């Protein structure tokens, strides 16, 4: 067992603890970025002037009328930018555009003494536009050949030959929607300038280092002149990985020009109309099966709807392509990927980062084809699972493939699936206008950043003379419990009680050059960096303890706040730290970690881009009303692989939350744009339906896979942020099967995504009328 994954007997990791800020959250005392405004004097407020066109050239911009509004202090335009007028890492996102690219695009920003004055000032700005042709839907973009970025090609085997020899061949087309992050805290930034011209930005960002970089190049400064801090976020889900940079830059620019703090916080409608969403996708595919229901070949073209600029669309597409197999061995694969350019918000990272979109394609295929092949969908999925020794289409061995079967078998047994399936068949036979169904789906999700360079992290750990410990790391807290896990890692490594460890807010002047808290890698990367820093300190203290106890430093053990030798003699942690200080021993350390074993050729789409795979299985039972298509999620059973959990209570919460968010994407959350104006129609909670208590399953059982130690990862744990979201495929597949139950046996249902009650009704109505998808 590696030193990184080895877990001591008296470990603080693995203990079920509440979120470290839970009490602050429920009492309302937890501070978020915008709460700091009330603690800051002379703050100016920012408000955008937004375009009413999906695509237009700005022919005139008159800001003088805004200055006639009482309280308006400054209007920011492109002429004010001292550095680079761009907020994107691909240099295709002008902060102040000459050509607006989507309805809601910010043309300029008004700063005022109050938010209301800023709003009125923005309304007074006069803008003239020359409307230009626009493409709002992904189908329009495909037809027009409107693409951006680099297309990718993934191939293994001989697809043409395999399809020619297949016993069954099916063709299909599938378009599925994106998703709004709808974090509770909208985008927010507060910027200040000190007497030396140093910029300090408080930002709700998942990627402080990149926010720092963008702010610096907009202002024409070096990165050391900009410090970005993230206290915590009220949700992120990927929406605050790239999108906060421009808003932080606006606040920093305003503070630089006025000498006063500037606060920028989007209201909900602004956030919905200005910020990116999950990429919607369009797919065309041909699939071949053997006579015994084995997948033989898949030929697919997938198109991501990137919106108006690239953002993270290229790596999102690559991850979708790498996950189109999900948990299934497909000997012959050919996938072409491309990114559509449309006049919508620039779509961005969202929990799963393309993985859910790729996996949805194969799950939709299996759900459609199972009835046509004469198989129960549960059996068809199981017989195509990866087996030990198999490799993915891009050449990575599928380690621990047996965990798929372990999760599947546990769900079958604990969920009493066989008996319930019989009960459901009996129920459906007795009810003509209400049908039930139970579906099971697996998850195999790769963990690591697509870009190998991002798989690194740093940490800074201080031990003070009184024995108390302060840790800094590069990860950000968005409610996912990362800080809780990092406190447990530090306490375990140093062998001290959790109460002796405190965590400082994430800041770029404490830990530099950090990667985004994304790709489910926050605990893996930052936990290993913290462990590395703590081990450096522990090794120094072991030398001191060895001298104090008269033993070899190799025989020193740290646990429960006492440092002991093998004989049992010991010294109190606080006493040892104080002794080390007086011996002039360094009591702080900078830790570092880089994920080993990764290699990836992005052009060839070959290599081993993931440290490991996370596995899981979910069974979902639904009941559908034949008159309305409305449905109830009756029961969910999940077994999920998180390795040796760092914090079980946190992990179970993440699994539950991820599943519900995935169910929202697949069944409820319906983004709608007006295809003529490009206006987002669903720009409020009143028109964009989110999962609520009424959508929660009546019975919700979540179990962590046991004996799932992961070698080479901090304390044997695994990532948990993104993989559970894809467990929600089981809900959509159960709805498909319930809709099919309204028709004759063997009916195959083509189900839209999201599978809203309307979509389910039209699907069951077609089934009831005898119509079946034929492929």
Image (cartoon, grey):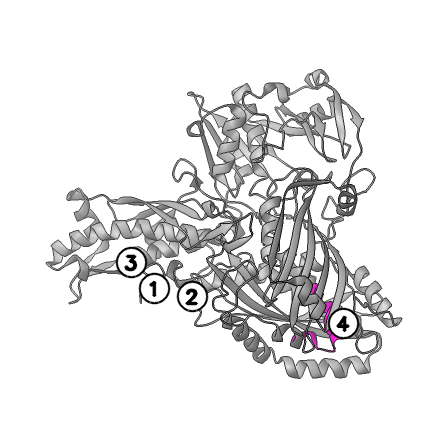
**Mark 2 — residue?**
644
Identify the element where label 3 is drawn: loop
Dot 4 falls on a residue whose secondary structure is: helix
Where does residue 206 sit, x and y in percent of width and height? 52, 44
Vertically, is 218 above or below 607?
Answer: above
| Magenta-drawn segment | 364-378
Query: In screen coordinates, is 749 left or right of 552?
Result: right
Q: Nearer the viewer, mark 3 or mark 1?
A: 1
Q: Which residue is denoted by mark 4 in the rendering?
A: 738
Question: Label 2 near label 4: C-beta < 8 Å?
Answer: no
For label 1, the residue is 7
Mark 2 secondary-structure assignment:
loop
**Among numbered discs 1 and 2, the one appearing first in the sequence:** 1
Q: Which mark is residue 495?
A: 3
Counting residues from the start of the chain, the first of labels 1 and 4 encountered is 1
Front residue (pair 201, 475): 475
Query: In screen coordinates, is 631 left or right of 86?
Result: right
Q: Earlier in the sequence, mark 4 or mark 2?
A: 2
Answer with mark 3 or mark 1, whichever residue precedes in sequence: 1
Residue under the point 86% across and 67% down: 766
Q: Is residue 56 left or right of residue 478?
A: right
Foreground disc of the pair 4, 3: 4
**CB-based contact (under 8 Å), mark 1 and mark 2:** yes
Q: CA distance from mark 4 to mark 2?
A: 37 Å
Q: Name the main secondary structure of what is drawn in magenta.
A: helix
Label 1 Cα neighbours within 10 Å, binned few <14 / some 14-19 / many ≥20: many
| Nearer to us: label 3 or label 2 | 2
Most distant residue in the left direction? 550
Image coordinates for residue 257, horizontal then vertical, percent: 55, 19
Total number of numbered labels?
Answer: 4
Secondary structure category for the residue under label 1: loop
Question: Vertical placement of 440 versus 662: above or below?
Answer: below
């Amino acid at each position: 067992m590696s030193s990184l994954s080895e877990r001591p007997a008296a470990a603080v990791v693995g203990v079920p603890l509440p979120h470290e800020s839970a009490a602050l959250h429920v009492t309302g005392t937890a501070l978020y970025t915008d709460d700091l405004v009330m603690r800051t004097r002379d703050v100016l407020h920012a408000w955008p002037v937004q375009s009413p066109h999906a695509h237009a050239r700005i022919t005139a911009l008159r800001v003088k009328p805004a200055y006639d509004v009482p309280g308006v202090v400054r209007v920011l335009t492109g002429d004010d930018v001292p550095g680079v007028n761009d907020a994107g890492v691909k240099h295709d996102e002008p902060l102040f555009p000459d050509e607006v690219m989507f309805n809601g695009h910010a043309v300029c920003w008004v700063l005022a003494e109050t938010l209301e004055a800023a709003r009125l000032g923005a309304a007074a700005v006069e803008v003239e536009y020359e409307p230009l042709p626009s493409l709002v839907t992904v189908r329009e973009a495909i037809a027009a050949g409107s693409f951006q970025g680099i297309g990718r090609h993934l191939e293994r085997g001989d697809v043409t030959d395999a399809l020619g020899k297949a016993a069954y061949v099916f063709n299909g087309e599938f378009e599925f929607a994106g998703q709004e992050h709808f974090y509770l805290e909208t985008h927010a930034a507060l910027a200040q300038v000190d007497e030396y011209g140093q910029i300090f930005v408080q930002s709700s960002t998942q990627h402080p280092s990149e926010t720092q970089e963008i702010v610096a190049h907009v202002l024409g400064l070096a990165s050391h002149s900009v410090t970005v801090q993230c206290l915590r976020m009220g949700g992120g889900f990927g929406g605050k990985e790239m999108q906060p940079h421009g808003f932080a830059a606006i606040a920093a620019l305003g503070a630089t020009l006025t000498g006063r703090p500037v606060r920028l916080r989007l209201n909900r409608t602004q956030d919905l109309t200005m910020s990116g969403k999950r990429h919607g996708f369009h797919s065309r595919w041909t699939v071949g099966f053997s006579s015994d229901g084995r997948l033989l070949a898949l030929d697919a073209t997938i198109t991501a709807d990137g919106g108006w600029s690239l953002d993270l669309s290229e790596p999102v597409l690559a991850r979708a392509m790498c996950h189109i197999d999900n948990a299934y061995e497909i000997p012959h694969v050919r996938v072409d990927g491309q990114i559509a350019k449309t006049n919508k918000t620039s779509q961005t990272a969202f929990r799963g980062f393309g993985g859910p979109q790729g996996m949805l394609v194969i799950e939709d295929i299996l759900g459609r084809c199972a009835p046509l092949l004469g198989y129960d969908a549960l059996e068809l999925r199981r017989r195509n699972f990866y087996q030990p020794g198999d490799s993915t289409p891009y050449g990575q061995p599928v380690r621990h493939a047996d965990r798929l079967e372990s999760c599947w078998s546990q769900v079958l047994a604990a969920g009493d699936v066989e008996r319930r399936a019989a009960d459901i068949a009996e129920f459906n036979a007795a009810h003509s206008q209400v049908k039930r169904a139970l579906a099971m789906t697996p998850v195999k999700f790769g963990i690591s950043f697509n870009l190998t360079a991002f798989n690194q992290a740093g940490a800074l750990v201080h031990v003070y003379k009184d024995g108390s410990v302060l840790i800094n790391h590069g990860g950000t807290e968005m409610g996912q419990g990362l800080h809780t896990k990092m406190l447990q890692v530090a306490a375990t490594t140093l062998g001290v009680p959790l109460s002796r460890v405190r965590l400082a807010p994430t800041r770029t002047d404490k830990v530099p050059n950090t990667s985004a808290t994304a790709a489910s890698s926050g605990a893996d990367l930052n936990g290993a960096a913290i462990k590395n820093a703590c081990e450096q300190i522990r090794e120094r203290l072991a030398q001191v303890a060895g001298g104090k106890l008269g033993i070899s430093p190799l025989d020193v053990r740290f646990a429960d706040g006492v440092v002991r030798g093998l004989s049992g003699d010991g010294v109190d942690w606080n006493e040892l730290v104080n002794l080390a200080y007086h011996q002039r021993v360094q009591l702080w350390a900078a830790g570092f970690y880089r994920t080993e074993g990764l290699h990836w050729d992005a052009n060839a789409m070959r290599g081993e881009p993931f440290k490991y795979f996370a596995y899981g299985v979910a069974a979902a039972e639904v009941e559908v009303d034949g008159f309305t298509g409305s449905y109830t999620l009756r029961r969910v059973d999940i077994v999920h692989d998180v390795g040796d959990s760092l914090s079980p209570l946190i992990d179970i919460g993440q699994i539950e939350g991820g599943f519900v968010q995935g169910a929202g994407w697949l069944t409820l959350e319906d983004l709608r744009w007006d295809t003529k104006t490009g206006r987002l129609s669903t720009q409020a909670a009143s028109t964009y339906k989110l999962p609520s208590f009424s959508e929660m399953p009546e019975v919700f059982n979540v179990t962590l896979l046991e004996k799932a130690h992961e070698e080479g990862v901090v304390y044997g744990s695994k990532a948990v942020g993104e993989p559970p979201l894809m467990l929600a495929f089981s809900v959509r597949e159960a709805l498909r099967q319930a809709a099919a139950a309204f028709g004759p046996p063997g009916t195959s249902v083509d189900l839209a995504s999201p599978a809203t009650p309307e979509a389910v009704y039209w699907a069951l109505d077609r089934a009831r009328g005898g119509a079946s998808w034929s492929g």
